[in-house]
Image (tube, grey):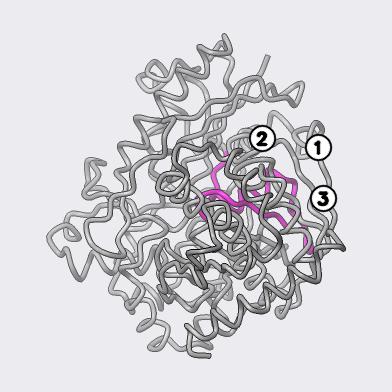
Amino acid sequence: MALSIGYDIGSSSIKCAVLDVEQGKVVGRGHYPQEEMEIMAPHPGWAEQHPDTWWEHVKTVTRQTLAKYSIDGTAVKSIGISYQMHGLVIVDAKGAVLRPSIIWCDSRAVEIGEKAFAKLGAKFSLKHLLNSPGNFTASKLRWVQKHEPDVYRRISKAMLPGDYIAYKLTGEISSTISGLSEGIFWDFQRNAISNELLKHYKIDPELLPKLHPTFSVQGTIGRTVAQELELNPGAVVSYRAGDQPNNAFSLNVLNPGEVAATAGTSGVVYGVIGQVRYDKLSRVNQFAHVNHTQQKTRLGVLLCVNGTGSLNSWLRKNVGGGLSYDEMNRKAESVPVGSDGLAVLPFGNGAERVLENRNTGSRFIGVDFNRHTAAHMFRASQEGIVFALTYGIDIMKEMGLRISVIRAGNSNMFLSPLFRRMFSTITGATVELFDTDGAEGSARGAAVGAGIATMADVFRSLKTIDTIHPDKQEAAVLKDAYKRWVEELNSILGQ
């Protein structure tokens, strides 16, 4: 038996999936911790987690999953890693972490990125980097350079969250083109690391890791690590990708016109295109997809709304009064479309790229103390999340992306029948649900990267479990509510 194990290094938890490669079936799943991991915010707009916490949770979830399903870890041949995108991990010459990771929803580098966009020029940035340097990893590294010079001087390597987990597994510091592109380090015209960006930020190229192909043997786990995780010491790390490219891969979204969506802590719509295109305002972003090569362009157009599942989690903790998510969903279903005039802007988790890197905060608009209840807040919040994603999808359509079918995993907010029905109705797209997730996707990718399975092999067992079509009866009312929502947002944005 050949097994492949995949990890999803999220900001809420670490997920794990074990794949029987020959059968193409998952034989074990786990996640840890059970409650969402803490995101530290020592200052407004900051968001940090310690990389060593992720690593400890990787070890715990691995041992727990193997024990729960009576899996022989010595049969694991390949390891894949999916991870929260755009984070910064820095280590010294001994590989020790120098400071907590500045993660994806941290807003401190927004101004740095905006100044770089103006200095480098929109034409250069969008043509070569496909994005504004924005609040991405390169800008976060520049922030450390400017504000923590003593820390910066001690840096041996700067990397992404998934690169750090791969390093802890193999002892080798490396990355991928897809990874460097999400950090806005990659020049797509020259097919190399961007010397112009590094020169502007005064970043030494030696700080960046060496590169491996996304699907390839990227290192072998050490004997000590194998003992800690109860795995085969000959297992190889053979796939890594940011969570959104990997989510698309897990849904077999690899070709132009195919679209994936997820709504975990953040909400994302990710469509694949086969040529270089960009939004002039950089409100949606393009990165190298997992199967991008110099010969075959495969870019992921990524729309991200930071405050989706995070808003739902906030409601459950602060408004739900002990209700489960299922109970919240049922209460939301009892409220009519449009939430009796209550509207929610779900932008409460840092600066939003879709709003040109503005941090408006979340807002509940039109609250009537005599009419609105917690159930209205639950419904209006789900509507607001769907509307925010639709706002970004409209931008993607302006870029030429045609969306008729959207694939999503049956997890997070897509577990809500109300959410997925509204999402299908307002976008006009058919939603196909699959019983898969990021950890399973990274396990499948690792089997391909290790050469023990083909693409056709790993997707053989991927089946649609539900198909949701637009609700024609609700469409008109929902679209009117969306129109009012956009007017409220434009008023706040001064448009």
Query: Of helix, strand and loop, which one carries label 3?
Result: strand
Q: Position of residue 333 (x, y in %)?
A: 68, 49
Q: Which one is closest to the eye, mark 2 or mark 3?
A: 3
Vertical relation: 202 (above or below) 20: below
Residue 8 spot, x, y in % from top left:
52, 39
Q: Amino acid at mark 3?
A: Ile
Which residue was labeled with disc 2? 444
Asked where in the image residue 138 lies, by quadrant, the reply is bottom left
Name the mark nearer the viewer: 1 or 2: 1
Query: Which residue is identified by label 3?
Result: 468
Q: Looking at this rendering, what residue extends furthest in the left direction?
A: 150
Q: Is 365 displayed left or right of 349 in the figure?
A: right
Of pointers 1 and 2, the one earlier in the residue sequence: 2
92 vs 269, nearest the viewer: 269
Q: Quadrant of the N terminus?
A: top right
Amino acid type shown at disc 1: Ile
**Residue 193 in view of the camera:** no
Question: Tag 2: residue type?
Answer: Arg
Q: Between residues 316 and 19, which one lies in front from this camera angle? A: 316
Which percent across, then down, holds residue 49?
32, 47
Residue 200, numbered circle? none
Give me the C-alpha separation between circle 2 and circle 3.
26 Å
Residue positioned 52% across, 52% down in the render: 374
Q: Is residue 454 left or right of residue 81?
A: right
**What is the distance, in whole Å, between disc 3 and disc 1 at their CAs?**
10 Å
User: Is any atom of residue 476 visible in this view?
Assistant: yes
Binning the other alpha carbons within 10 Å of mark 2 as few (below 14), some (14 to 19) or many (20 upward) gives many
Residue located at (48% from left, 89% from top): 494
Location of residue 5 by image quarter: top right
